[in-house]
Image (spheres, rainbow, N blue to C red):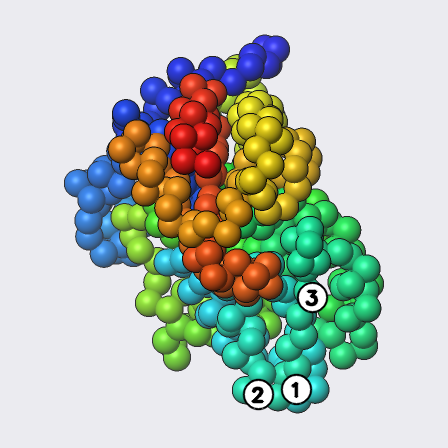
Amino acid sequence: MSQAKPLNIDFVRSQFPGLNEWALFENAGGTLVPQSVIERIGAYMTDTQVQPGAEYEASSLATKRLETSQQLMAEMINASPEEIVIGPSTTMNIYVLAHALWPWFRPGDEIIVTNLDHEANSGAWWRLAELGVIVKEWLMDPETAELEIERLADLLNERTRLVCFTQCSNITGSINDAAAIIRMVHEAGALACVDAVAFAPHRALDVKALDVDFYVFSTYKLYGPHLGILYGKREHLLRARGQNHFFIGEDDIPLKLIPGGVNHELTAGLIGIIDYFETLHRHHLGDGNAALHLRLAELFALMADHEETLARRFIDFIDAKSQLRLIGRKTADKTQRAPTFSFVVGNRDSREFPRHLLKSRVAIRSGTFYAQRCVDALGLGPQNGVVRASMVHYNSLEEVDRLIAHLDEVL
């Protein structure tokens, strides 16, 4: 393997046909896809838009492509293919998971959720209260917007069965110490369900290193098609109640947890995510023989370095603006945060700022971003939520400077 080069932003951007005169900073809502994803979806629909599972050529090729996607998604996060559930979204995957797990719970059992999370990893678990399950909230500090592990320790007890939390907030960008939290949960005899949606575009994933029980992320926020991935330890998925047709066996994982089966063409498009990552790895690091998840760790380290540079430029701007209140950690440190920045300006309506930037072709957004409990706890509902500018590795410093310049006009 050759020595790593700094991220070649021109090479990166050349892979994304959707990049144009707009500076896109709503990546936490969904990223662009590289050409490789478009080609994989197009190839499936051109060559194999048939029902997979049969023996004739097109159907056989369709089956192979879907199996390859399953295998690659598993390798990407250091899991086995039968531990990967490919569904339409993270929200739907957790909703299905909650239904699959409800027979595990008895009245008086406890589930812990947070008020920092996206609703996907909260709302489905709150519904289990209808069965007599006690749902408790791990409340963030409203001043710092942080989840403090000491508060979780006070909530855990012998009745705790499941703890659901985010690895990285889609509002604050703060990265939580998921490994430490999971260890604490396991020591209490409970399981952990971790939302990695806002983490996955920025850092390599390794479910075995975390020893996590359930882990979710969205591929449309990871440079891929609009799908969600649910990981579950094999023993948990086997024990979970099937949610597919009655004739799908309880030992048929992951199919029993995919009602109606996967979306064929979008699932085939997942291969294009790995095509893209492999292209970047070869360009920056050369060919390597390590396992895919290890090669991706090398690549994401380069991405994180670049993102930290972008974040530092924006944090310096924030530091100079006393009227701008950043929600979360005021640091660019890549070990502490992803480059997702939410802020408010005095008592002004957050909707004002994205509208102002439209004429300059700079795309940001305002609102609650499906983290309604978080925004309410911060007292920001009257301002129509926060303004959010979120960056990924294909953004450039020049784009960040455009964002800063045009925000400065309206502060």
The CA distance from mark 3 to mark 2 is: 21 Å
Q: In the image, 234: left or right of 241?
A: right
Mark 2 or mark 1: which comes first in sequence? 1
Question: SS of the residue at dot 2?
Answer: helix
Q: In the image, 171: left or right of 62?
A: right
- Badge 1 density bin: few <14, some 14–19, many ≥20, Cα 10 Å: some
- Badge 2 density bin: few <14, some 14–19, many ≥20, Cα 10 Å: some
Q: Nearer the viewer, mark 1 or mark 3?
A: 3
The residue labelled by disc 2 is 131
The CA distance from mark 1 to mark 3 is: 21 Å
Q: Quadrant of residue 273?
A: top left
The residue labelled by disc 1 is 106
**Whole-percent x, y for residue 21 in the image:** 28, 25
- The amino acid beneath tag 2 is Leu
The CA distance from mark 2 to mark 1 is: 8 Å
Q: State whether residue 351 appears in this view.
A: yes
The residue labelled by disc 3 is 138
